[in-house]
Image (cartoon, rainbow, N blue to C red):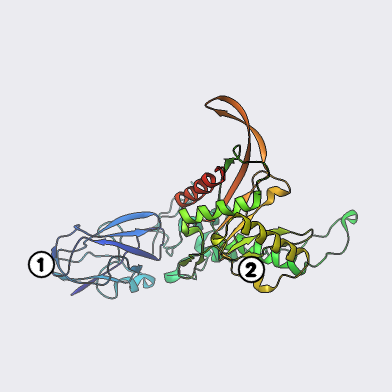
Amino acid sequence: MTTFHLPDLGEGLAEAEIVAWHVKEGESVTTDQPMASVETDKAVVEVPSPFTGKILKLHAKAGDIVETGKPLVEFELAPGAEQPKAELSAADTHLAHGSGDAGTVVGFMSVSDREWVERSSNDRRTSADSPRRRVRAAPSVRMLAKRLELDLSIVRGTGRHGLISIDDVLNAADFKRHGRPTYQMPKLPPHLAGEFETLRGPRRSMAHTMTLSRDEVALCTIFDDADLNLWPAGTDITSRAIRALVAGVRAVPTLNAVFDPNGPSRRIFEHVHLGIAVDIGDKLLVPVIRNADQMNLAELRAAVASVKKAAVDRTLTPEDLKDYTISLSNFGTLAGRYATPLVVPPTVAILGTGKLRRDVVATDNGVEVHRRMPLSLSFDHRCINGGEACRFIAAAITDLERID
């Protein structure tokens, strides 16, 4: 019996999801016959059979996530069939577990502790002259290291099987885990001299929260405009914006969620518990309107007025500021057309509404001047894709452009 382990499919990815099996237990296969479709990152690739023989056991089923190097298939080799040879380093021996399998896609990706290394034109040595340990890192990590001019070969990976993470790169580049660079504040010239004020209270909390957002969220923002030309006079802007956000959630519920990167996993909520940003001078608070999806426009107006009054009167309790599932920043009541609102973990989306403007637009009747609302939707691209975000903002725009 011979064990074939999930190969490293490129870029040092630590795991892959089984999309579908093309073989069954007890079935005979030939070398290079497709066995399974697996998904890594955004690619689905075929894993071919490394041997000619019979499938004795499949170690995973469709939908399972398998770590690189873990058993995938048990084979009974056909008489006279040979296993592929590969040079195994001590660091990679765990991939084969003594089976003679290099843990790779057969014939193309043999495992070795040597790599081709880019060198200057006056250095004629090849990888065979200079053994070098394998560097396991995702494309985004390699790009970050390149921007920081950091040689990944000197970075110790703390992930599975030595996978180098973004934190590993930042730490190697003299960043602490909490995100502040480890530099010393330079001495300021006399005309800038003075004491630094320690941030306290809500402003200190904001500094920590925004640092967390910067370090943890794969932020992406899309922009669009809603035409409000049909709105009757006196329409309440904030309550309509909330109703539009709820319409977006109903169309794409995945944006009303929290994300746990340790899974990675997420929880999608049935009801909208809306965090709404309230500016009270030197502080920005985010009280929560519970079950906003169950309120009509009049109830939403009353709820917004209530949380704003509580914020101004300093009567908000800790419970009033926690556990929202999506948020709204109505920054346009002050100024600004578009923005990049920051997503606060563990939520995955925030909708920003900018200052209403009168724009020249082309219509079927010619050129007209319409009042329009700029929209900015930020989302966490780790668990929300671009299509979902676009469908969300399209549904919100459709609701905003209604007369009622």
Tell me which amino acid carries mark 2.
Answer: His
In front of the other: label 2 or label 1? 2
- Please tell me whether residue 226 is drawn above or below residue 275 in the rendered image: above
Quarter of the image with the N terminus in it:
bottom left
Residue 146's disc number? none
Q: Secondary structure at mark 1?
A: loop
Q: Nearer the viewer, residue 205 or 368?
A: 368
Residue 178's disc number? 2
Q: What is the x, y in percent for residue 239?
A: 63, 53
Tell me, yes or no, if residue 342 can be seen here. no
Q: What is the x, y in percent for residue 291?
A: 56, 64
Crowding at dot 1, Cα within 10 Å, few <14 / some 14-19 / many 20+, comes out as few
Return the residue found at the far left: 79
Q: Nearer the viewer, residue 38 or 307?
A: 307
Q: Which residue is mark 1?
A: 80
Picture quadrant of residue 195? bottom right
Q: Residue at x 57, y 60 (%)?
A: 295
Mark 2 or mark 1: whose residue is earlier in sequence? 1
Using residue 84 as the reference point, say whether residue 384 is left or right of it. right
- Please tell me whether residue 219 is drawn above or below residue 399 in the rendered image: below
